[in-house]
Amino acid sequence: MQTAATPDISAELRQRFATANRVLVFTGAGVSAESGVPTFRGGGKTATWKGLPFDVISSGAMLERNLPAVWEWFDYRRDLLRSIQPNRAHRAIADWQDRFADLTLVTQNVDGLHQRAGSRSVIELHGNIWRARCVICQTTHEIPLEGARPDACGDCGNALRPDVVLFGELLPPGAFEFAAQRAARCEICLVIGTSGLVYPAASLPEIAKSAGAFVCEINPEPTGLSDFCDAVVAGNAGDVLPQI
Ligand code: OAD
């Protein structure tokens, strides 16, 4: 019987993992779940904030209407993250950097936990919650782990917004295109902790598979991507990744 603690790691995945040179790791909120970061849609539930679904408060339309409310939601999420540490899944992925000739890490997460675990060159498709961006000149400003966030642009004095992609907005210029290029040349694509519902990010596994890669999902729940993957490991990323 298979449990989250003893996931059935596909023999084919292990064998391919042992010999691969080019690996693409694509992560979503589930990779941070074991650190205590709530997912958006895991367990069949949709995250809400003060009665609003997360995709309403996290939207470009809300930003236009009520920037302080959007900040309130992101301030709340940053507060949650302050006391949170990277978990075994983040650390396993960081270790893989030295194991493969060519490892690309693409994340939809904005929490910065991959970097805190030691991952370098993370492609962040949806931005980073630890940065603010000027609504006029687009200059970005780091938000410190401790202490207050800047309340206006240090360069031009205009309002700042979270440097995060909101619903209805475009991805950062070039980020998806670069990730797609890497997906098109990987041998293995690991799809970890994502419901695979948000595009264009969710098309990366399809690009990898069309180009001949072995695509493996690691998730305790089935997703819309499961049937199309070459292998599915049903388990928590923190249990599975250190064992691959
Ligand atoms: P979701 O919340 O949609 O999906 C999280 C997935 O993680 C679910 O499929 C869970 O089953 C899985 N999961 C939960 N615990 C896990 C664990 N311990 N190990 C592995 N998997 C686990 O999150 P995303 O797919 O990342 O966008 O959502 C995509 C985007 O939607 C996010 O980047 C965010 C959101 O709106 C923006 O912020 C722009």
Image: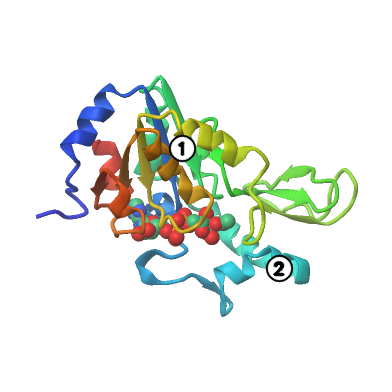
Q: How would you rate the neighbour count of disc 1 (Cα within 10 Å): few for under 14, some for 14-19, many for 20 or more?
A: some
Locate residue 233, reporting x and y percent.
24, 48
Residue at the farthest bottom position:
51
User: Which quarter of the frame holds ligand 1?
Assistant: bottom left
Element class at badge 2: helix
Locate residue 54: give its quadrant: bottom right
Residue at the farthest top position:
101
Quadrant where the N terminus sits is bottom left
Rendered position, 46 above or below 242: below
Rendered position, 69 above or below 147: below
User: Which residue does the image show at 43% across and 23% down from the upper left?
Assistant: 102
Please state which of residues 36 and 60 is positioned toward the viewer in this rendering.
60
User: Which residue does the image show at 75% across and 71% down from the upper left?
Assistant: 66
In the picture, measured across the screen, residue 1 lies left or right of residue 106, that is left
Residue at the spot of label 1:
117
Please state which of residues 48 and 222 is positioned toward the viewer in this rendering.
222
Rendered position, 79 above or below 66: above
